Image (cartoon, helix red, strand yellow):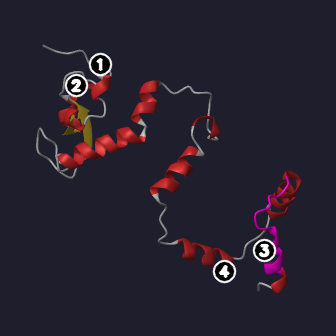
Amino acid sequence: MITEARVKYWNSMKGKSLSSITKNKMSLKAKGHIVSSETREKIREKAIGRLHTQETKDKLSELKIGEKHPNWKGGISSLNQRLRASREYKEWRLMVFGRDNFTCQDCKKRGIYLEAHHIKSFSLFPEFRFDISNGITLCIDCHGKTDLYRKRSRRI
């Protein structure tokens, strides 16, 4: 139940920032605070169906990039790993799949695990890495038959 006194207090605090000591005290008080199953259920029901905007997703993502992430180990990932885990690479992959109607372009199979293959090598042609026309959808078996698959030397 919200009392008139609380509303008056909240209005008086608008625009003011709390000291770090006060924030620490509030944090310590909240730790170990037991929330009833009814309250937990109300919170869950209110959150169902709510979607984050792309702007919010980007902000949340920025909060855990690099040194800010709890699993950060000092930047040991290679450039290749970082590029292939990037949002841009994932979007390129989905665009290639969509263009090819999620069908292997070699054996024409659908409904199986697909891989996006770079026609011009990912490492040798960095300017074409995210060019959709440089990609083709292949199943695992057909991808394994291509030249340079998993750094295999070109067979001529």
Along the viewing direction, whichever of 53 and 99 lies nearer the viewer:
53
Gap in angstroms between the C-alphas marked 3 and 1: 61 Å
Dot 3 amino acid type: Asn
Q: Quadrant of residue 36?
A: bottom right
Dot 2 amino acid type: Lys
Dot 4 amino acid type: Glu
| Residue 136, percent from left and from top | 19, 37
SS category of the residue bearing label 3: helix
Mark 4 neighbour density, 10 Å: few (under 14) some (14–19) many (20 or more): few
Circle 3 residue? 11
Viewport quadrant of the N terminus: bottom right
Q: Are marks 2 and 1 in contact (CB under 8 Å)?
A: yes
Gap in angstroms between the C-alphas marked 2 and 4: 57 Å
Dot 1 amino acid type: Leu
Of mark 2 and mark 3, the one earlier in the sequence is 3
Along the viewing direction, whichever of 26 and 55 lies nearer the viewer:
55
Q: Quadrant of residue 11?
A: bottom right
Q: Are marks 1 and 4 in contact (CB under 8 Å)?
A: no
Gap in angstroms between the C-alphas marked 2 and 1: 8 Å
Circle 4 residue? 38
| Residue 73, percent from left and from top | 62, 30
- In the picture, the disc for residue 87 is none
Q: Are marks 4 and 3 in contact (CB under 8 Å)?
A: no
Q: Are marks 2 and 4 in contact (CB under 8 Å)?
A: no
Of mark 2 and mark 4, the one earlier in the sequence is 4
Q: Which label lies toward us, 2 or 3?
A: 3
